[in-house]
């Protein structure tokens, strides 16, 4: 019994939260990785693009709520996501046309493009803060829990409860759908294959008649879709605050690099690596060991490897270690 | 002289703008902008040494700035005796253990060939060391932080004049840069940028949460100043006479002696804040000028020529027998040390150390905007960038308010859009920053004062 209790404890405090946080990071990391593979620069606007897409999703959610439209037990935001995606796509395409295409045709070095993306980062931040303000916003509606701790305890008769929030399940389902569609697109369709070819070897791809404009455009569209969905899922699960999104850029980059930047599948797994390591290392295992060890061996301390203050530092340290020993990331594989 | 005409005119415009602020807003405001412009200029020079001379991207600027600030605390605060008694010995033992771990790891790295076993042994040594560290430091930290936690609760510093910290800060930052450089300099440009950004996050996380070191987010306030205090000035004879002399015209118009007295008192209070800031500005100018002379000399020395050769084509430089890796490490350390000086200067000016306010994600990019806008590879450009961008950053909000009032003058006072726009004024500075960066990169990609190639 104690053994099952300890497993449930870990599920509740480590596995379920890490899985949903990891999915949100993974979505961001995939598009950062794609942009790096195809456009060949570090896209510093990543976090703010997510907040941009989320902001429009929130605005549409509010609009639908004012019209009295909702999805019952599901959050209204799911209905608003497509509209948010459309606006984000228009925004990134306009940005590409006005700003990035100039440097691309000039064949500027990647560092230059990264600096330019810092400029667009500032602009995007300003737009988001001017439209919706810098404050914390919650836009979740519908049923909050799928499984409450008390219900679980009654159901199973265990001491430990297991809580599953509906947003966690939604995050996981949406991630599975989006990511599998994306990999199907990249591996099976002609356009997807041409994107991979372009990322592998630009000159060869151009020689074989691949239209670079189309490849670039589709990359931006995918980036906008992933950014909006990832951002909205994060906002539903936690809350929407532009500065948090800006900060999330760091774990997203960490995930993309740990997974091998330019490799979307690696980035997808990298998201989970970062999320799990953050939570595993900062969790206090005292209760877990109380369950599985005999009473005489019960621990005194919290048995926490690092305090939660260092949550971010953990993922960055992992990144530094990976960069030191395997600069091309854990999951090398082929470049996109 | 002709080749310096653009430099002179650019600086004249910048000074004119600051003086304009003095007339339009207040002299105290203008001087504090000037002081921060000078601090930013030092930071920008540091970043420019790395980016402009050697083409290294360092996004870890905030980490070095925070270390410089930490140096200011550790140098100027008097030592807390009770805390040293409570846990000082253990902390010294911990420092020795860290040194010991590093020594052993270095020994293993030198002595044995690269293999999996070597990695396992190193990992084992580090983990055992960390366990010992935690066992010894845990109770010590607890007892140090328990010493009068409302005001101290940390080990304190050395109680020296704070100006020394400018040098100590440079050493701290340089030492960190040496470690980071050893780890990360082999990476490609954009990887290096991200790695340094993340490492600076780690550094700031440590400073924020290790309360025994510098009180963490509880902040250290009331640091000693290198310049006189306003309160002392207001009671000093010569200062009151000086103010009276300066304002003779205004004072002589007032006939009533009581009123005259009050007027003088007010003038002395205003004058004292301006005087203090003037002192700071003088000190900072000295630092900027010294750094400028050194960096200018370095840039046009054979060493500077070699650095530019490495920047423009490192393979060719390598083939010519220049040690690229070593030179990169050297310049990384030097540039970071300069940023460390700026960090110590900033804490000196503020008189307090607030680790919570070091936000790598925001200010790092601001410094980089300064470098790019000013003109990389040109020290005068870097300083100008620091001035111009900090000025924009501060003055963007009042300017935005002015513009919004003009554009929405047709709308009513209570109009929703107008209120919303006025409330979001602080965020227009982000827009201005982004637009400035994008415009400069597009139409003047070498910056306002581009690098001059002298052969």
Image (cartoon, coloured by chain):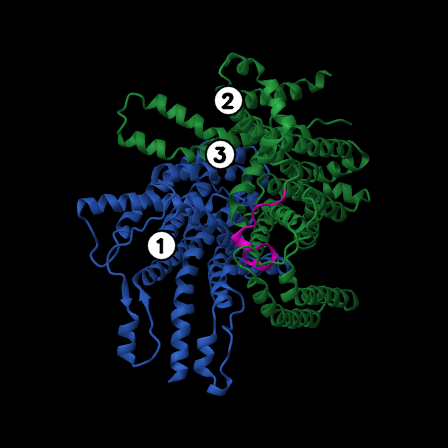
Chain colours: A blue, B green
Question: Residue A265 placed where, x, y %?
Answer: 48, 58
Pick out the residue farthest to the left. Answer: A68
What is the number of the mark on residue B434? 3
Q: Is residue B298 visible?
A: yes
Residue depicted at x 61% and y 18%: B245
> Label 3 vs label 2: CA separation?
45 Å
N-term-proximal mark, 3 vs 2: 2
Tag 1, which chain? A
B445 vs A142: above or below: above
Q: Which residue is mark 1?
A: A233
Residue extent of the magenta highlight? B209-224
- Chain letter for mark 3, please: B
The residue drawn where x is 20% and y is 52% is A70
Residue A45 x %, y %: 47, 43
Mark 1 lies on a secondary structure that is: helix
* Disc 2 packing (10 Å; few <14; some 14–19; many ≥20): some
């Amino acid at each position: 019994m104690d053994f099952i209790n300890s497993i449930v404890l870990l599920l509740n405090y480590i596995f379920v939260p890490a899985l949903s946080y990891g999915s949100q990071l993974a979505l961001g990391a995939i598009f950062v990785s794609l942009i790096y593979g195809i456009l060949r620069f570090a896209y510093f606007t990543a976090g703010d693009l997510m907040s941009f897409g989320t902001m429009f999703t929130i605005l549409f959610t509010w609009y639908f709520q004012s019209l009295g439209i909702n999805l019952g037990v599901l959050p209204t935001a799911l209905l608003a996501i497509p509209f948010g995606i459309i606006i984000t796509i228009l925004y990134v395409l306009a940005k590409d046309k006005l700003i990035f295409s100039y440097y691309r045709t000039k064949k500027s070095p990647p560092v230059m493009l990264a600096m330019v993306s810092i400029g667009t980062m500032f602009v995007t931040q300003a737009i988001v803060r001017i439209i919706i303000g810098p404050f914390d916003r919650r836009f979740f509606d519908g049923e909050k829990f799928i499984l409450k701790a008390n219900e679980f305890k009654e159901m199973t008769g265990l001491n430990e409860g297991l809580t599953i929030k509906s947003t966690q399940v939604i995050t996981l389902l949406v991630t599975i759908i989006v990511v599998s569609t994306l990999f199907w697109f990249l591996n099976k369709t002609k356009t997807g294959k041409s994107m991979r070819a372009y990322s592998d070897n630009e000159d060869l791809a151009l020689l074989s008649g691949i239209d670079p404009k189309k490849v670039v455009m589709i990359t931006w569209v995918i980036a906008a879709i992933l950014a909006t969905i990832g951002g909205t899922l994060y906002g539903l699960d936690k809350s929407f605050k532009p500065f948090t999104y800006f900060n999330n850029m760091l774990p997203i980059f960490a995930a993309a690099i740990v997974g091998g930047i330019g490799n979307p599948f690696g980035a997808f797994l990298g998201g989970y690596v970062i999320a799990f390591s953050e939570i595993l290392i900062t969790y206090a295992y005292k209760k877990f060991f109380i369950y599985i060890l005999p009473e005489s061996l019960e621990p005194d301390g919290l048995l926490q490897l690092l305090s939660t203050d260092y949550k971010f530092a953990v993922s960055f340290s992992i990144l530094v270690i990976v960069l030191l020993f395997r600069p091309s990331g854990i999951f090398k594989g082929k470049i996109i | 002289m002709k080749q310096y005409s653009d430099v002179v005119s650019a600086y004249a415009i910048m000074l004119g703008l600051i003086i304009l602020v003095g007339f339009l807003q207040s002299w105290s405001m203008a001087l504090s902008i000037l002081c921060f412009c000078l601090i930013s200029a030092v930071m920008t020079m540091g970043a420019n040494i790395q980016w402009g001379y050697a083409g290294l991207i360092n996004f870890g600027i905030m980490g070095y700035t925070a270390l410089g600030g930490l140096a200011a605390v550790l140098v100027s605060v008097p030592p807390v005796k009770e805390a040293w008694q409570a846990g000082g010995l253990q902390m010294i033992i911990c420092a020795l253990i860290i040194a010991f771990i590093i020594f052993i790891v270095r020994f293993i790295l030198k002595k044995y060939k690269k293999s999996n076993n070597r990695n396992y042994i190193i990992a084992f040594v580090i983990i055992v060391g960390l366990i010992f560290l935690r066992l010894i430091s845990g109770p010590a930290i607890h007892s140090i932080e328990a010493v009068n936690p409302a005001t101290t609760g940390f080990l304190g510093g050395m109680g020296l004049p704070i100006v020394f910290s400018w040098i100590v800060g440079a050493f701290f930052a340089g030492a960190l840069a040496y470690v980071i450089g050893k780890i990360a300099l082999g990476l490609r440009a954009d990887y290096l940028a991200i790695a340094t950004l993340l490492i600076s996050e780690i550094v700031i996380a440590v400073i924020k949460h290790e309360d025994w070191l510098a009180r963490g987010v509880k902040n250290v306030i009331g640091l000693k100043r290198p310049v006189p205090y306003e309160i002392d000035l207001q009671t000093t004879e010569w200062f009151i006479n000086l103010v009276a002399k300066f304002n003779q015209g205004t004072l002589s118009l007032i006939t009533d002696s009581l009123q005259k007295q009050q007027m003088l008192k007010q003038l002395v209070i205003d004058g004292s804040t301006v005087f203090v800031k003037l002192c700071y500005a003088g000190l900072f100018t000295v630092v900027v000028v010294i750094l400028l002379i050194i960096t200018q000399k370095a840039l046009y020395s054979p060493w500077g020529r070699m650095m530019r050769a490495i920047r423009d084509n490192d393979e060719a430089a390598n083939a010519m027998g220049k040690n690229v890796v070593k030179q990169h490490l050297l310049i990384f350390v030097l540039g970071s040390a300069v940023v460390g000086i700026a960090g110590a200067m900033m804490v000196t000016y503020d008189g307090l150390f607030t680790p919570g306010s070091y936000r790598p994600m925001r200010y790092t990019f601001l410094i980089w905007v300064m470098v790019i806008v000013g003109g990389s590879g040109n020290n005068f450009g870097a300083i100008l960038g620091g001035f111009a961008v900090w000025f924009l950053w501060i003055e963007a909000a009042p300017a935005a308010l002015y513009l919004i009032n003009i554009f929405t003058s047709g709308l009513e006072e209570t109009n929703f859009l107008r209120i919303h726009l006025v409330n979001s004024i602080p965020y227009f500075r982000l827009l201005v920053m982004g637009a400035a960066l994008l415009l400069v990169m597009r139409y003047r990609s070498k910056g306002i004062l581009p690098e001059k190639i002298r052969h």
